[in-house]
């Protein structure tokens, strides 16, 4: 069985930075270490951290009961309101928000303060998008698909600023941009999809087009992994979405000779290697 492993698979820069920050606190013997939300969308990593004593805070209400400790802000970032609440608590804050996400916060805050309506292209319920929206001081809309963009209506003279969730499907973002241009909107478009996401999606699409079967590895709640699966599925009918090697319970058709493997930005290298080695040996 020939295996094609994507070069851009596994932890991206922002995720590596965030996860390393948590393990640093553990290695330094810090007690009462918390992350606001799961540090990344990968259950195996979150479970490992919990076993080492790191607790996950899921809401501001849970935050009320914490009197001391270190709070690490996840790679997705948090809302402006949550950040202010953390500061008011007087706890030690380690901000592990991805720099690319931070950049979007700054863009939205500035453009919104200048009177522009903010358009965010992304998943409205994703924590990254929730954080981005909170930095707008005026009207803000979240569009999840090109279809929603076609239905969106605003006065043609209105000044708009468009940004995207860092892990949004790049092809769908380009399609959305074209729709806004066709409508003649006065829009400042800022491509905030991170370069790692673009590379990962482009490479996954290219590999999926060459192979007989494609395996996409990542957390079920990982937005960027789900988008990889969506992209690969369009190019390869035999595309499988797994979290770990234990999920690899598949019977490949006999004609399958080449298998491609890619992984989301929150998938540990160890899991990718386990899957790759198993496919080479067993399938």
Image (spheres, rainbow, N blue to C red):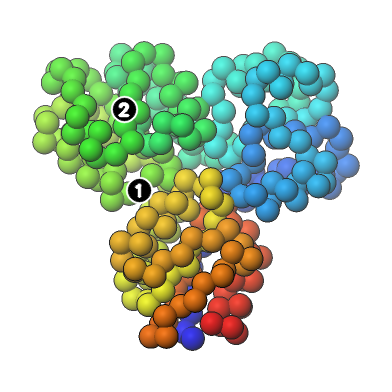
Q: Identify the disc placed on residue 225.
A: none
Up/down of 57 relative to 207, above or below: above
User: Which image quarter holds the C terminus?
Assistant: bottom right
* Secondary structure beneath label 2: strand
In the figure, residue 55 lies in which quadrant?
top right
In the figure, residue 238 lies in which quadrant?
bottom left
Q: Nearer the viewer, residue 252 or 33?
A: 252
Residue in the image at 44% along x and 51% along y: 226
Up/down of 23 relative to 113, above or below: below
Q: Nearer the viewer, residue 244 or 268?
A: 244
Residue 243 place in picture, x, y as percent: 58, 58
* Secondary structure beneath label 1: loop
- In the image, taking residue 98 as reference, residue 108 lies left or right, namely left
Instruction: Find out whether the residues at labels 2 and 1 contact each other: C-beta distance under 8 Å.
Output: no
- In the image, taking residue 176 as reference, residue 128 lies left or right, namely right
- Circle 1 packing at 10 Å, graded few (<14), some (14-19), many (20+), is many
- In the image, taking residue 33 as reference, residue 81 lies left or right, namely left
- In the image, taking residue 60 as reference, residue 9 lies left or right, namely left
Residue in the image at 31% along x and 66% along y: 235
Residue 110 place in picture, x, y as percent: 39, 21
Residue in the image at 47% along x and 67% along y: 215
Up/down of 240 relative to 124, above or below: below
Q: Gap between marks 2 and 1, in whole Å?
A: 16 Å
Q: Which of 35 and 7 is in front in this view?
A: 35
Q: Identify the disc placed on residue 119.
A: 2
First in sequence: mark 2 or mark 1? 2
Residue in the image at 59% along x and 83% along y: 282
Q: Identify the disc placed on residue 169.
A: 1
């Amino acid at each position: 069985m020939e295996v094609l492993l994507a070069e851009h698979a596994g932890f991206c820069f922002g995720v590596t930075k965030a996860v390393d920050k948590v393990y640093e606190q553990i290695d330094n013997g810090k007690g009462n270490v918390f992350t606001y939300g799961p540090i990344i969308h990968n259950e195996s990593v979150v479970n490992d951290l919990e076993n080492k004593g790191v607790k996950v805070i899921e809401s501001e209400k849970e935050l009320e009961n914490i009197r001391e400790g270190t709070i690490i802000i996840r790679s997705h970032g948090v809302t402006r309101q949550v950040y202010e609440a953390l500061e008011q608590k007087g706890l030690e804050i380690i901000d592990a928000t991805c720099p690319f996400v931070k950049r979007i916060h700054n863009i939205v805050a500035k453009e919104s303060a200048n009177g522009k309506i903010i358009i965010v292209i992304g998943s409205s319920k994703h924590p990254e998008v929730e954080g981005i929206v909170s930095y707008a001081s005026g009207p803000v809309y979240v569009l999840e698909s090109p279809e929603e963009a076609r239905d969106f209506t605003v006065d043609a003279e209105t000044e708009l600023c468009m940004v995207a969730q860092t892990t949004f499907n790049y092809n769908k973002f380009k399609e959305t941009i074209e729709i806004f241009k066709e409508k003649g909107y006065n829009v400042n478009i800022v491509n905030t999809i991170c370069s790692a996401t673009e590379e990962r999606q482009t490479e996954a699409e290219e590999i999926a087009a060459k192979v007989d079967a494609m395996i996409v590895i990542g957390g079920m709640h990982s937005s960027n992994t789900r988008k990889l699966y969506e992209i690969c599925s369009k190019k390869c009918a035999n595309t499988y979405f797994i979290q770990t090697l234990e999920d690899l319970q598949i019977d490949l058709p006999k004609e399958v000779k080449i298998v491609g493997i890619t992984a989301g930005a929150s998938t540990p290298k160890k899991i990718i290697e386990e899957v790759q080695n198993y496919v080479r040996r067993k399938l």
